[in-house]
Image (cartoon, rainbow, N blue to C red):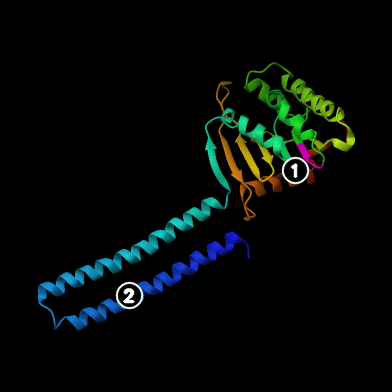
Amino acid sequence: MKLEKIVIWFSEVKFRYGIIICCILAIVIALLLNFLKDNLLEDWYSAISNTLIALSASVMVSFLWNKVIFDHTQHYAKSGIRDYFDDFSEVQIAIAKKIEKAKNVEIFFMYGSTFLNANSSAIKKLMKKKNSNLIVMLADEQNNFLPIYEQYWNYEKDQFKKSINKTICELKKWHGEIAQENRCNLEIYKFTKGCFTYSYYKIDNDIYFVPSKAVAEKSFKPITIYACKTTNENCMYERVGREKAHMIGSGELVKIYPGGSS
């Protein structure tokens, strides 16, 4: 049994036994009060009974409150979410450092030239590590949504196409400059059909998830959610992985390198 499941099981058992103990305590208090009733002055009896009832109630409420907090914590923790950032620029340095040390990196974005320009050194260091893996997924130049994004975000016509071609050419060039026996495994995919509602950066067991902005203003920066892989199959890390696998299976993501056409 994995550690997370053991912790959950232990907490649930503790809660059940806590409720049982509270019930037993309530019965004991009732018997004790009944026993003391004829042996104490009325004022003393009232004071003792009120104190014992208050203690019993507080213990019961404490167990129930801890259970509520635990349930909410578990519901949140299963997603794997660990942090939130107002702006992607707040995590770029952290991402670059992790890429340099990583074994497996997976990136999904629209065109990538901005990211590559800012993190070329980290990408090149990863490429020089034998038995490491780099997967890059970006828009197909023929994706029907690109002209719409260019128009909406007020970019020049075909600017995204040029950026995509530049990203692909640079990745291939950097990879090709390294001796085959010393370089990472590089795969490049094109996203052929869908629109871009998010981008993400998987680095070993971490993921930085960036929802796409909905506003046209260029200066508006989207948020970034940082999460880790957990044992829960529905955590953010696993859900994104299943969506990627589905897109490959449906032909929405097509491998162009190695093999394929550019």
Q: Mark 2: which amino acid?
A: Leu
Between circles 1 and 2, the one closer to the viewer is: 2
From where the camera sits, is residue 252 visible? no
Instruction: Specify the segment rendered in magenta.
Output: 131-135
From where the camera sits, is residue 52 visible? yes
Circle 2 residues within 10 Å: few <14, some 14–19, many ≥20: some
Return the x and y of residue 143 as percentages of the image width and height.
75, 30
To which quarter of the image does residue 131 belong? top right
Q: Mark 1: which amino acid?
A: Met
Return the x and y of residue 133 as percentages of the image width and height.
78, 40
Q: Is residue 157 above or below residue 27?
A: above
Rounded to the nearest angstrom, the CA distance separating label 1 from label 2 is: 58 Å
Return the x and y of residue 218 as percentages of the image width and height.
58, 21
State the predominant SS element of the stretch in magenta: strand
Q: In this view, does 176 lie above or below 35?
A: above
Circle 1 residues within 10 Å: few <14, some 14–19, many ≥20: some
Q: Which residue position is annotated with label 1? A: 247
Tell me which residue sits at (41%, 59%) in the image: 66
Element carrying mark 2: helix
Q: In this view, does 195 lie above or below 155?
A: below
Tell me which residue sits at (86%, 30%) in the image: 178
Tell me which residue sits at (53%, 38%) in the image: 84
Quadrant of the rendering where the C terminus is positioned: top right
To which quarter of the image does residue 193 belong? top right
Quadrant of the rendering where the N terminus is positioned: bottom right
